[in-house]
Image (cartoon, helix red, strand yellow):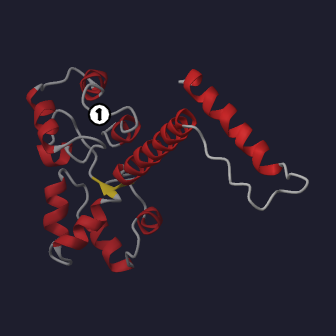
């Protein structure tokens, strides 16, 4: 990769030098210097690579979904208010009233008494029910960062896990490296 970029960098330096030097008295009939076909191919390749890199970075940024940070069973009133945008004191009270949550379905059912499904979905971007790998349902397991519902079902099919480490070994096979810390933090102690 570096070998391919060196000619591009050298060419860019040449262009930069050519652009900054001003001739004494340019002739009015002098035309702008046009790069050769080979030079143009190098320029086109460099632009193409830069565009592809930028597109890949934009796609990765758009796909990134941060892990929920508010543990529904242990968060204080202040942590809930700080972690869930736009939530009021009444909803914080409702979050606390139904503790301990054993599944995300329970959270959805209880909060469904007060708000609609889209609002609950917004809450779920910030909150989670702690995941017990040997006892939770697939929807609760699918809360883990980077785990789809199908992957959650696969993890459940491998039960029982001897201990937390055994589950983490199975989890690392399913989630991307970037998702692993967030998923691990969502497990029951």
Residue 168 % position (x, y): 30, 26
Report helix, strand or loop for mark 1.
loop
19 with respect to 53 (left or right): right
Determine which residue is flagged by label 1: 175
Q: Vertical placement of 171 versus 62: above or below? A: above
Q: Is residue 47 visible?
A: yes
Name the residue furthest front.
Answer: 29
The residue under the point 26% across, 59% down is: 99
143 with respect to 18 (left or right): left
The residue under the point 26% across, 51% down is: 129
Q: Is residue 137 visible?
A: no
Q: Vertical placement of 138 versus 103: above or below? A: above
Name the residue furthest right.
Answer: 24
83 with respect to 159 (left or right): right
Residue 51 % position (x, y): 46, 47
The residue under the point 31% across, 22% down is: 165
**Closer to the camera in the image, 76 or 23:** 23
Quarter of the picture containing the C terminus is top left
**Closer to the camera in the image, 87 or 61:** 61
């Amino acid at each position: 990769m570096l070998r391919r970029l060196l000619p591009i960098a050298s060419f860019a330096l040449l262009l930069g030098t050519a652009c900054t030097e001003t001739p004494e008295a340019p002739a009015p009939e002098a035309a702008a210097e046009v790069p050769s076909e080979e030079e143009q191919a190098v320029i086109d390749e460099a632009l193409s690579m830069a565009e592809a890199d930028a597109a890949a970075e934009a796609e990765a940024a758009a796909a990134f979904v941060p892990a929920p940070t508010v543990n529904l069973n242990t968060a204080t009133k202040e942590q809930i208010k700080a972690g869930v945008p736009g939530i009021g004191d009444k909803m914080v009270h409702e979050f606390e009233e139904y503790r301990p949550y054993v599944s995300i379905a329970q959270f959805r059912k209880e909060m469904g008494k007060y708000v609609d499904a889209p609002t609950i979905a917004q809450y779920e971007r910030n909150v989670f029910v702690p995941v017990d790998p040997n006892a939770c349902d697939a929807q609760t397991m699918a809360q883990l960062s980077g785990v789809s519902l199908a992957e959650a079902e696969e993890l459940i099919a491998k039960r029982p896990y001897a201990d937390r480490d055994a589950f983490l070994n199975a989890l690392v096979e399913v989630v991307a490296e970037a998702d692993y810390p967030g998923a691990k933090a969502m497990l029951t102690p």
